[in-house]
Amino acid sequence: MKTPLTHTIRPKEPPLDLSQYRRTGGYRAAELTVGRTAPGDVVDLVKRSGLRGRGGAGFPTGAKWSFVPMGDDAPRPKYFVANADEMEPGAFKDRYLLEGDPHGLIESMILSGYAIGAEVGYIFLRWAYRLAYARLSRAIAEAREAGFLGHDIFGSGHAFDVHIHVSAGRYMCGEETGLLNALEGKRATPRHKPPYPQASGLWGKPTVVNNIETICAVRHIVFHGPDWFRELGANGGAGTKLYAASGKLRQPGVWELPIGTPLGEIIDEHAGGMTSGARFRATLPGGASTEFLTREHWDLPLDFDPVATAGSRLGTGTLIVMDDGTCPVGMVHNLEAFFAMESCGFCTPCREGLPWTAGVLRRLEEGRGRYEDIELLRHHAKLLAPGVTFCALAPGASAPLASALSLFGDDFERHVREGRCPFRAEA
Amino acid sequence: MAALSSAERAEIDAEIAILPDARSASIEALKTVQRHRRWIDDDALGAVAEYLDLSKHELEAIASFYNLLFRKPVGRHVVLVCDSVSCWILGNEAVKQALEDSLGAAFGEVTRDDRFTALPMQCLGACDRGPALMIDEDLHGPVQPADVSELLRRYP
Ligand SMILES: Cc1cc2nc3c(=O)[nH]c(=O)nc-3n(C[C@H](O)[C@H](O)[C@H](O)COP(=O)(O)O)c2cc1C
Ligand code: SF4
């Protein structure tokens, strides 16, 4: 299989060290760019590549960078932050890059940092990724030693260094402004936008936050050019995407595929289909905070726009597959309990409403629910929807709940009618 | 041992050195103290607050926000069981039950021999290896309920 962005990753083996990475052409793009090309040209390449943010929202990366103040009177230092929090339940794609391609990430951070004129880079790393931490630390030390990070990178006179912050664990740390607060040693509550981080981010300085997968594409775009990247997509999309799938699958895992690969192909061909006895019923296409897709969407290209048209979100592109033996009420209960625990507490529908929602779902799952509960859940899903709360956590919690209620209403009603969860063996 | 040890201070100083101000190091400082003492008691919290020139209340607000800063005692080994949706689909309820049975302690408690504290955690980012759990720095998965007691034996 063609894996243009991840061909240097050897799963189950240690990642390439500096000299091995150099032999694959590594750090060539950075060497030829830093101090030799105008930063604006790098932004332009990324714009023309059609790269869209892989952290969930799909925002065009080049456009995001172009809001950073440039020139001699721009505030300093500027920061480039790599979001490796990946706390979204069901998501584990960034881990593949962090463990498998640490030098690729560092080189891409150098290029991204150069494009926005940043002197300092941070990797905000999920605490559970111990192996990634060890490998990244080693790669950073090697890159410093070689003069690719530090005060005078590649002898260009430009400074750029990278530090790792290991998170103390909270879903809100992944939200970009919550992340900035965490880096400043505060509670990871979201900030008001505007001002956007590009204008006033970390310690009030211009800052860009990008997802690990987004960043890792940058060195390839600079090396091969934007047209090369664009053409890697399928069904009109630009580039490849790391898709992942978990659930009762023969080969759960992560795969680099053309963006726009259809849902059914990922499940049948790449994940090897369902395990014996399990049948596909639905999937969350992009982590916990997305709406369910069903059989009806088997041929749907998994790219930002088609998935949005189908009423869901591509999100992280990490599928959580629900089989016909998994209870939708129990599954949504698990999700809402997570969101309830991770609410930062600022908005009432989120702080008060989510624990209550989780409680009602638990009651239903345990066979103590009432028909009115289902209506209450429908109503509350609306109070969590976009536009009502301060950040996107609550809408993310609303997405699987609202879609489960409309797709699997019968299952909710059966729980009430039978006074038990029909998916659990009778005690 | 309330006052910060010289090792703790050295580690905290190294963090402060790469930050614009001392207070930005609060999370790193709390993690440092936890690494040395397993958990952060009130005296330790007070010592860190004083060192970073924060009020105790400000620092408590930060400490209590993060899932992995422990303000209650934990055992020598911390077991984090992934509680998120993919592991749940793959049967983590039985693993959690087996864990509580083997430990003879509920989640959040310290076992009588001071060896373990188990905590449910969302999420470990090992959805392709569910049901997953971590013991200290080691990731294990897929874990079957029957594997649990043998796994625990490896952590004396
Ligand atoms: C509650 C919440 C959690 C998030 N967690 C992550 C995360 O773990 N990793 C990530 O890259 N983006 C996460 N995001 C999205 C970020 O806010 C941000 O949009 C993203 O890092 C931008 O990167 P991109 O433009 O490269 O996609 C989260 C958003 C919300 C609302
Ligand atoms: S929606 Fe929830 S997590 Fe987001 S700001 Fe409001 S309370 Fe906090």
Image: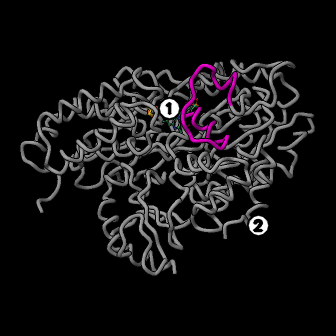
Task: Measure the C-alpha gap from mark 1 to mark 2.
Answer: 41 Å
Residue underneath mark 1: A56
**Ligand 2 lies in quarter:** top left
Chain at tag 1: A
Q: Main secondary structure of the magenta part?
A: loop
Q: Which residue is disc 2 drawn over?
A: B7
Q: Residues within 10 Å of mark 1 (few under 14, many from 20)?
A: some
Which region is colored magenta? A175-201
**A32 vs A367, nearest the viewer:** A367
Q: Identify which residue is drawn at 47% across, 40% down.
A: A243
In the image, residue A176 sits, relative to residue B48, either above or below, namely above
Q: Is residue A188 magenta?
A: yes
Residue toward you, A85 or A223: A85
Name the amino acid type tagged 1: Gly
Relative image position of residue A71 (x, y in whole percent): 84, 18
Is ligand 1 less than 8 Å from the beta carbon at label 1?
yes
The answer to whether marks 1 and 2 sit on the same chain is: no
